[in-house]
């Protein structure tokens, strides 16, 4: 689950009520025009996974929207044409999203509706995920103790059953690992016999509308009535989610001891995974 600070502004028009985009005016898709003949379509340059991650989410987000031929202001403002440009570009070129940091990579997939299609995570990003898992594994006993004292008994019991299976609760946003915390968010990691971990989760937002896997009350909350006038891209992106744009998606990510990653098939029940026996 992507983590943004909960702020809000005036509601954007509901996605259900938005007019259909005029695709006749959309910019042409990536390619070049051969003056000696018809247009020649080229696959856009995709680079290598995570190669721009160190530039940060702000710069990555600008580049990701610009590559689709969309206006960053139009996209964040909920303009139907700009959102359609992004959807169309990444539907045809999902591999391009992989070159960014994890928050932008997964958010673009959420907004364009492509989900885990063509998803690749770099080895360096895999090492960061692995670090979050190992850090949280050390904190698990204290976390269980806190739950026993403060959480709903049924929830605490369910939590403890997962731990008894060997699963590790990861709250990476609390571990000083912002790239992982603002992308994968909180998740369960399941140890495997080969020393790797499997993460089986859904990328969604708690403050999206209920039909997008969120909570209607949180989607309509307004913690800052003036934030609609702000140009903070994170706030604007959050407003897009609150108004119903984007599609949640499930993924299964395997992280090996050296940080290498593998995207597994469609999510199944955890019983289908190779649980590490104690």
Image: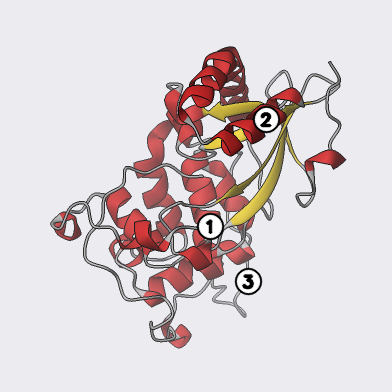
How far separated are the C-alphas under marks 1 and 3?
Answer: 30 Å
Disc nearest the viewer among 1 and 2 = 2
Tag 3–tag 2 contact (CB < 8 Å):
no
At mark 3, the secondary structure is loop
Of the 4 image quadrants, the one containing the C terminus is top right
Q: How is the image coloured?
A: secondary structure
Instruction: Judge whether residue 199 can be spotted in this image.
Output: yes
Q: Residue at x 61, y 17 (%)?
A: 137
User: Which residue position holds label 3?
Assistant: 40
N-term mark: 1 or 2: 1
Q: Position of residue 23 (x, y in %)?
A: 47, 84
Which residue has dot 2 on it? 189
**Sequence-wise first label, 1 or 3:** 3
Give the total of numbered labels.
3
Residue density around tag 2, few if under 14, some if 14–19, many if 20 or more, within 10 Å:
many
Q: Which mark is residue 110?
A: 1
Q: Could you tell me which residue is drawn at 57 percent across and 28 percent down?
A: 170
Q: Please name whichever residue, 101 or 255, is drawn nearer the observer in this view of the structure.
A: 255
Looking at the image, residue 15 lies above or below residue 96:
below
- Cα gap from disc 3 to disc 2, whole angstroms: 45 Å
- Looking at marks 3 and 2 on the same chain, the residue that comes earlier in the sequence is marked by 3
Q: Secondary structure at mark 1?
A: helix
Q: Is residue 178 left or right of residue 159?
A: left
In front of the other: 153 or 274? 153
């Amino acid at each position: 689950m992507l983590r943004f600070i909960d702020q809000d502004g005036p509601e954007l028009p509901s996605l259900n009520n938005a007019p259909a985009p005029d695709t006749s005016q959309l910019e042409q898709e990536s390619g070049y025009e051969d003056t000696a003949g018809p247009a020649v379509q080229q696959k856009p340059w995709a680079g290598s996974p995570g190669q721009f991650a160190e530039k940060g989410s702000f710069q990555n987000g600008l580049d990701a929207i610009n590559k689709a031929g969309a206006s960053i202001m139009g996209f964040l403002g909920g303009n139907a044409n700009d959102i359609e440009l992004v959807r169309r570009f990444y539907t045809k070129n999902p591999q391009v999203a992989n070159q960014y940091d994890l928050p932008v990579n997964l958010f673009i997939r959420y907004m364009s509706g492509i989900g885990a299609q063509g998803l690749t995570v770099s080895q360096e990003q895999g090492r960061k995920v692995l670090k979050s898992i190992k850090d949280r594994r050390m904190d698990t006993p204290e976390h269980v103790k806190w739950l026993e004292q403060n959480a709903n008994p049924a929830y605490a019991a369910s939590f403890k059953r997962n731990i008894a299976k060997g699963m590790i609760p990861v709250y990476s946003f609390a571990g000083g690992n912002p790239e992982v915390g603002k992308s994968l968010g909180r998740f369960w990691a399941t140890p495997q016999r080969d020393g790797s971990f499997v993460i089986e989760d859904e990328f969604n937002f708690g403050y999206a509308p209920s039909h997008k896997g969120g909570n209607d009350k949180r989607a309509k909350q307004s913690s800052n009535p003036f934030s609609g006038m702000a140009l903070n891209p994170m706030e604007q992106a959050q407003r897009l989610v609150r108004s119903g744009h984007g599609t949640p998606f499930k993924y299964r990510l395997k992280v090996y001891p050296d940080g290498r990653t593998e995207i597994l098939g469609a999510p199944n029940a955890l019983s289908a995974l190779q649980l590490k026996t104690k």
